[in-house]
Image (cartoon, rainbow, N blue to C red):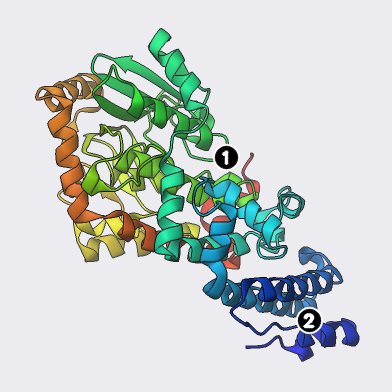
Amino acid sequence: MSIDGNALKSAGLDESAVAELIAATPKRTGDFYVDRPRYERFWQLSRDLLARLPKKPTRNAAEAGAAAAVLAGARQQREHFLATHCELLYDELTRDRSKFIRVEDLVFAAADAVPGLTPTKAQVAVEAPLLQSEKDGAEIDQGIFLAHVLASETAGRHLCHAMLLPRPETADALKKLDADGALDFGKVSVERRGKAAVVTSKNERFLNAEDGTTLDQMEIAVDATILDPKTDIAVLRGGPVTHPKYAGKRLFGAGINLTHLYRGQIPFVWFLQRDLGFVNKMYRGVAGPDALPDDVHGTCTEKLWIAAVDGFAIGGHCQILLIMDYILAAGDAFMTLPARKEGIIPGAANLRMPRFTGDRLTRQAIQYERKLPCDSPEGRLICDEIAAPADMDAALDKVVAGLTSSGAVSAVSNRRAIRIGEEPLDTFRKYFSAYARDQAYCHYSPALIANLEREWNAHNRKV
């Protein structure tokens, strides 16, 4: 498919500039060093033409159609380029996979190596202050790039390995945890309680939702919790919140911060950083640099995780339950996956939830936001134990004692054995290859904005 020149001309764009862009449409030779400058020139001409149009909120119908045609044409060529050259590019960026680069840095390294393939930091910064509805979605190109990286067995496994390594900040966090028995990052804390390290979410104003202020803190906390040699088990719980409706009540979590999402404060790469980062570390453990995190060889350091669910587990917090080893829930708690109302893909819930509830209930939960009370036959397919809300602390102590009574070694071995059959690393990698591209388009879909305005009253919410 080539760019529709008539759509561009109807928006009043210069005919010679349109003709130059169409003539520059690259044809792949299969030689990375021959193709790279040809594609770079095409993407530069695409950017120049897009810059001649008004900003997105003020475009008329013809101008909006022209912008869509330019963006679609440029993205089609990114797909073509990466289908042939992704692995060679990844090897160039990582020095033949001798260097680990995290996903949030890799997308910008690609922008420097092949101008136009992904947006630069400066280009992302231009759109960052805008409402989500006002952005052209330069970050969609990051999703296309990451989809191809993760589709490659060699590059994708290496990227997954990079994301399972401990964060650089973890070394200092471990020293403080060893000295004080506790860590407090502001939105997330860790505290040793007997044989357990308890991770607590504390985004109080937003019902313990996840956003850009919590992501790094949670990953460092998870690293330190898993690597702490003085505890045998990990617990995830939500702290008391300040929201007037639930003031003083513990809540497990409300998923992604929808107000921040609507206001453009959740960058696309946040989704991949989250699921390839702390969520996958909870599930697979923390890797070392010298061995691929292969379940068969047991090269990760991991702990069993208990979730203590107070109030509700909505969206991303319900996703997290699907990787927990044991779930204790209050009798009045519930779970939902309101992906349809949000207009996004609910992490790896599509991959993991059928293992608990079967296909039909998974579809009802994700595609029709069916609410699952924890203390119901359907809820008990996910939750292991129900306690009275007032008895959650005592019940949690009992669960920790029960799961650590036989020692940590056999417990970790058993969780690894279960994981080998359920979700090998390559299954995870392939899922997130498709997810990267699809979530990028969802993130910038007009339907997302319409859903948030209709279901969440997002335009009237305070940041």
Residue 454 in percent (x, y) is at 55, 59
**Please, what is the three-letter code of the amino acid marked with disc 1?**
Gly
Instruction: Say above or below: 279 vs 10.
Output: above
Q: Which mark is residue 30?
A: none
- For residue 42, which quarter of the picture? bottom right
Q: Tell me if residue 384 can be seen.
A: no
Q: Nearer the viewer, residue 341 or 305?
A: 305
Q: How many marks?
A: 2
Name the residue that disc number 1 marks: 212
Name the residue that disc number 2 marks: 62
Question: Where the N terminus falls, by quadrant?
Answer: bottom right
Question: Where the C terminus falls, by quadrant?
Answer: top right
Identify the secondary structure beneath mark 1.
loop
Q: Nearer the viewer, residue 333 or 296?
A: 296
Q: Residue at x 49, y 62 (%)?
A: 149
**199 with respect to 13 (left or right):** left
